[in-house]
Image (spheres, rainbow, N blue to C red):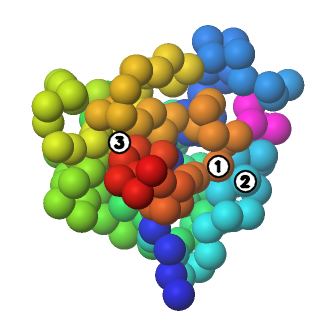
């Protein structure tokens, strides 16, 4: 049975992100290779991955090579660093779907690149990227940036179980 995964902020090809975010890589080649291996270690060919933005700083040919090496049906929600390129550019690079706007998943999860305004009275969870190593307190935001999750996509079940209140206890 296929699974659904979420991830964001790979910044493939972005050398400076290694220092900016204290990523544990000696260089951009190691970073790119490790993140591809980590993605494919959890995502199967029949799975779906929502990438919540800031995917690649590389040209079309190099980005296409990375997208094609990643397992799954890939949906991109454009991040601030992706918006300089057209929706068509990202589709041409190999993404199966591209959205310029946040999406709602399963009537409960707001998927966006930048964190959205949420408060404790709102019955939703904002799954987002953009803020890398930072994290908001509470159960209304879930930071899916790769820095928090071992540079691997997280399954829907992992996110759901982390944010949905267990009413049995």
Rounded to the nearest angstrom, the CA distance separating label 3 from label 2 is: 20 Å
Helix, strand or loop status at disc 3 = strand
Residue 158 x/y as whole percent:
53, 55
Task: Considering the whole magenta stretch, tell me its main secondary structure.
Answer: helix
Q: Is residue 93 left or right of residue 119?
A: right
Tell me if residue 120 is in the magenta stretch.
no
Q: Which of pointers 1 and 3 lies earlier in the amino acid sequence?
A: 3
* Foreground residue among 134 and 33: 134
- Magenta span: 27-31
Residue 147 x/y as whole percent:
62, 30
Q: Which residue is mark 2?
A: 38
Number of other residues with Cα within 10 Å of mark 1, as a class: few under 14, some 14 to 19, many 20 or more = many
Q: Which residue is mark 3?
A: 127
Q: Are marks 1 and 3 in contact (CB under 8 Å)?
A: no
Q: Which of pointers 3 and 2 lies earlier in the amino acid sequence?
A: 2
Identified at 35% across, 53% down, the residue is 167
Q: Which of pointers 2 and 1 lies earlier in the amino acid sequence?
A: 2
Q: Nearer the viewer, mark 1 or mark 3?
A: 3
Number of other residues with Cα within 10 Å of mark 2, as a class: few under 14, some 14 to 19, many 20 or more = some
Q: Which residue is mark 1?
A: 152
Measured along the vertical axis of the image, is residue 168 above or below residue 19?
below
């Amino acid at each position: 049975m296929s699974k659904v995964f979420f991830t964001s902020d790979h910044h493939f090809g972005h050398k400076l992100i290694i220092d900016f975010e204290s990523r544990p890589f000696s260089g951009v080649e190691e970073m790119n290779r490790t993140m591809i291996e980590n993605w494919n270690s959890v995502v199967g060919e029949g799975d779906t991955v929502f990438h919540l933005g800031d995917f690649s700083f590389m040209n079309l040919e190099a980005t296409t090579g990375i997208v094609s090496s990643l397992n799954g049906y890939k949906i991109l929600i454009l991040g601030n660093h992706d918006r300089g390129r057209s929706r068509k550019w990202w589709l041409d690079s190999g993404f199966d779907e591209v959205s310029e706007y946040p999406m709602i998943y399963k009537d409960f999860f707001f998927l966006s690149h930048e964190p959205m305004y949420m408060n404790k009275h709102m019955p939703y969870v904002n799954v987002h990227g953009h803020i890398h190593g930072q994290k908001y307190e509470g159960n209304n935001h879930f930071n899916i940036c790769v820095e928090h999750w071992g540079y691997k996509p997280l399954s829907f079940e992992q996110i759901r179980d982390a944010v949905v209140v267990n009413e049995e206890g």
